[in-house]
Image (cartoon, rainbow, N blue to C red):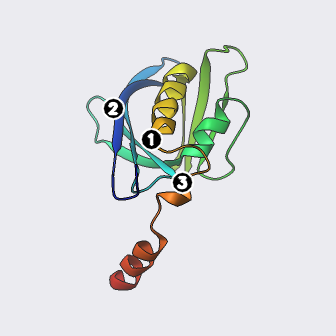
Amino acid sequence: MTREDHHEITTKVQFDLVSDHPVPVDVELRYDTRDPFAVYALFEPEGARAVQWILSRDLLADGLIVRSGDGDVRMWPDPEDAEMVMIEFVTPKGQARFEAFAQDIADFLDTTYEVVLPGAEDNWFDFDHEIQRMIAAG
């Protein structure tokens, strides 16, 4: 496979919004070799507008094992349930914490690694194209 052979991988998983009464939220995880460092997470809560977050693929992998992230997104293994991970999103308007099955995220990541190995993302990212795109956008 080469940089010109673009691949997109998507899967649906469920995250639970952590609250007094957990709320299940469908999340579509998408990986595109044109942006090999990122995973796009489209949150589709029932009865509300969808929200997309762009996550670091490395953060998702690290967060399966240890507390990771120090910006808007943080992830860590659930200390009370080894099968789960916690994912927290922080914005100026507030924060939301979700719980998800670690295996769902690990399976998705494994599928992305079949296309782009960890550490090989630079081989897929076209820096020249991205610089030209930014210059054109002004």
Mark 3 Cα shell of 10 Å, populated few (<14), some (14-19), many (≥20)? some
Mark 1 Cα shell of 10 Å, populated few (<14), some (14-19), many (≥20)? some
Does residue 18 appear in this view? no
Residue 71 position within the rendered picture, expressed as x and y whole percent measured from the top left: 64, 53
Residue 56 position within the rendered picture, expressed as x and y whole percent measured from the top left: 55, 48
The first of marks 3 and 2 along the sequence is: 2
> In this rendering, is residue 93 above or below 25?
below
Asked if residue 42 lies left or right of residue 70, the reply is left
CA separation, marks 3 and 2?
31 Å
Does residue 60 appear in this view? yes
CA separation, marks 1 and 3?
10 Å
Question: Where is mark 1, residue-wise?
Answer: 115
Closer to the observer: label 3 or label 2? 3
Type of amino acid at the residue the image marks with label 3: Glu
Residue 2 position within the rendered picture, expressed as x and y whole percent measured from the top left: 40, 54
> In this rendering, is residue 115 above or below 13?
below
Label disc, if present, on residue 121 of the rendered structure? 3
Residue 110 position within the rendered picture, expressed as x and y whole percent measured from the top left: 51, 30
Question: Where is mark 2, residue-wise?
Answer: 45
- Tally the numbered discs: 3
